[in-house]
Image (cartoon, rainbow, N blue to C red):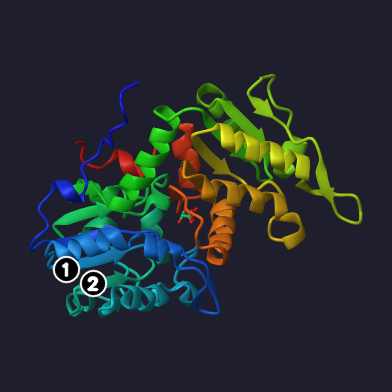
Amino acid sequence: MATYQFPKQTIADVPIRGRTVLVRVDYNVPLENGRITSDFRIRAELPTLEYLLKQGARKVFLIAHLGRPEGVARELSLRPTAVDLAKLLDEPVDFVEYVPGVLGKPEDVAAATSRVAVLENLRFSEAEETDSEDFARALVEATGADLFVQDGFANVHRKHASMDAITKLLPAVAGYLVEKEVADVMKAIHDPVRPLLTIIGGAKVEDKAPMVEKMLEVADEICLGGKFAQDYTPPESEKILMPVDARKDAEGRSLDIGDRSAVAIVEAIDRAETIIWNGTVGMAEEAEFARSSELIATALGQSGKTTIICGGDTTGFVLNYQEKYRDLKYTLISTGGGASLELILGEPLPGLDCLLDK
Ligand code: 3PG
């Protein structure tokens, strides 16, 4: 099969100088008492923002959602993300309390003087999720944007106004995060350096069973773990390696795969050249039952091979682990939970499909 080519135009394909750019980002970050507890997703967007600024964009407006509010919910304001971004970019970032029809006025947007501004949580209006073209038009008119950039990879499986309707009004291209996430995963699945190994853990059979079926078509080996592997009856296949032992708590509940099973996965990693990991293999939020997942994270992070980490819990686990062991390196730690799964399964991604073709 030919080498995978990202099929959409990106910010590298269009002139940027002097343009006013609306960038859809994923700032759906974890918050505790109004404080961001992980700015991984904000950092992941920096290459696109820095490129746009360096190329001379006149103004960059960031649009995003946070949580799943019903109406205006002040505790889900995006204001903290603007504060965080200003520190990361080391330049002022305006925060504008504007959501068409719900909060603020277009004049508030016009009054933002910094080169970069974050608008308030678009999901404060239900028009965002109903993919309303009027809502998208109001955003375009208030900002005066003449280019749309989709860089919220974690949202591309949603068909919302700030991702879909807006592309009917502005030329729409991908940012670097979307390009990297899609290209890394698509290459790993359709054009990998073989052998391709997939490690699938987690809890829910209904979430992970379709991934096993998909991977049976493309992977050379599949290792299963986690509660998922206890509850799931896999199809007959020589490619599938099931756990052979377990680490149990005092009540006899199996909460992690055992040492022999973890070593078998590490050996499979040694045999492979490309590895996709989705789902921790034990109850990794408890130190005692994180051991096998830690062994896998270490083996992958030291392997120097193509390593794709995806799924919300797995990426959270690996990011925390990498904080402690900074020499661990991965090809991609995906920002997308649902989006990366849909991408792997080959489901339609409306937020990507509507961008301009190459
Ligand atoms: C995510 O956190 O995975 C994305 O931001 C999508 O959020 P949603 O599932 O609420 O649409």
Residue 182: quarter of image: top left
Classify 10 Å Cα crowding around label 2: few (below 14), some (14-19), many (20 and above): many
| Residue 190: assigned label | none
Q: Is residue 132 visible?
A: no
- Identify which residue is drawn at 70% across, 55% down: 290
Left of 279 or right of it: where is 52?
left
The foreground one among 256 and 138 is 256
User: Going from the N terminus, do you reach mark 2 or mark 1 first?
Assistant: 1
Looking at the rendered image, the quarter that the N terminus falls into is top left
Disc 1 residue type (three-letter): Lys
Image location of residue 243, percent across then percent down: 75, 36
Discs 2, 1 touching: Cβ within 8 Å: yes
Residue under pointer 1: 59
Looking at the rendered image, the quarter that the C terminus falls into is top left
- Identify which residue is drawn at 12% across, 57% down: 16
Disc 2 residue type (three-letter): Val
Residue 98: quarter of image: bottom left
The residue tagged with tag 1: helix, strand or loop?
strand
Residue under pointer 2: 116
Image location of residue 305, percent across then percent down: 47, 41
